[in-house]
Image (cartoon, rainbow, N blue to C red):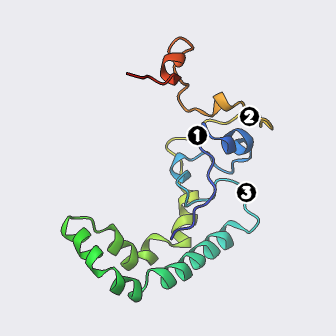
Amino acid sequence: MNISVTTPYPGTEIWHREARRLTTQDYRLFDIQHAVLPTTLKLEEFYEALVKTQQVLNQKHLGWNAIKDTTGLALRLALRGQTNFLTMIWKFNAVFNPKLQLADHRRKPRYEMPLQPEAEDKVDRKALYVHNPPGAAAAPSMMRPRFS
């Protein structure tokens, strides 16, 4: 179980509605683990509460009892080189760390997300594509069912 931070991505409805409220344009922070929209709490408090909540959930659902119950699965995955399940449990505090998350906000961005010029209350559904669908000539044949 994991908690995700609301993150507007280009091509989504929330991008069209909220992107002008972005607190950062740093592309690295658009990862559902960092706050890129304003938070009610101070950013430091937000990350502390986020990590604490995730720790409670992990202790309840991914503690020793969960490992006992899923030992076979964890071993099969590890033998195939898929160690992210076990790594996540053992390295939680190194990965989910409020101080590191806050430090990410202080780093100079290498790439910035483009700004959305104006918010839209009613979003055109066609604008929700990152890549627009094929032109009108191609669309009818793609949408029409084919029967043999």
Q: Distance between the residues labelled 1 and 2?
A: 20 Å
In the image: residue 113, left or right of residue 83:
right
- The x and y percentages for residue 109 are 53, 47
Please, what is the three-letter code of the amino acid marked with disc 2?
Val
Give the total of numbered labels.
Answer: 3
Label located before the other in sequence (1 or 2): 1
Secondary structure type for disc 1: loop
Question: Please, is residue 136 above or below residue 126 in the view?
Answer: above
Secondary structure type for disc 3: loop
Q: Which residue is drawn at 43% across and 85% down?
A: 63
Q: Tell me the number on the disc at residue 128.
A: none
> Can you tell which quarter of the image residue 47 is in?
bottom right
In the image: residue 62, left or right of residue 47:
left
Label located before the other in sequence (2 or 3): 3
Q: Distance between the residues labelled 2 and 3?
A: 22 Å
Label located before the other in sequence (1 or 3): 3
Give the class, few, some or many, for how many residues have Cα within 10 Å of label 3's Cα (few <14, many ≥20). few
Disc 1 versus disc 2: nearer the observer:
2
- Quarter of the picture containing the C terminus is top left
Give the class, few, some or many, for how many residues have Cα within 10 Å of label 1's Cα (few <14, many ≥20). some
Q: Residue at x 68, y 73 (%)?
A: 45
- The x and y percentages for residue 135 are 54, 15
Disc 2 versus disc 3: nearer the observer:
2
Circle 1 is placed at which residue position? 113
Q: Tell me the number on the disc at residue 38.
A: 3
- The x and y percentages for residue 50 are 61, 72
Question: Please, is residue 33 above or below residue 129 in the view?
Answer: below
Decide which of 99, 140 is in the foreground and name it.
Answer: 140
Q: Distance between the residues labelled 1 and 3?
A: 16 Å
Circle 2 is placed at which residue position? 123
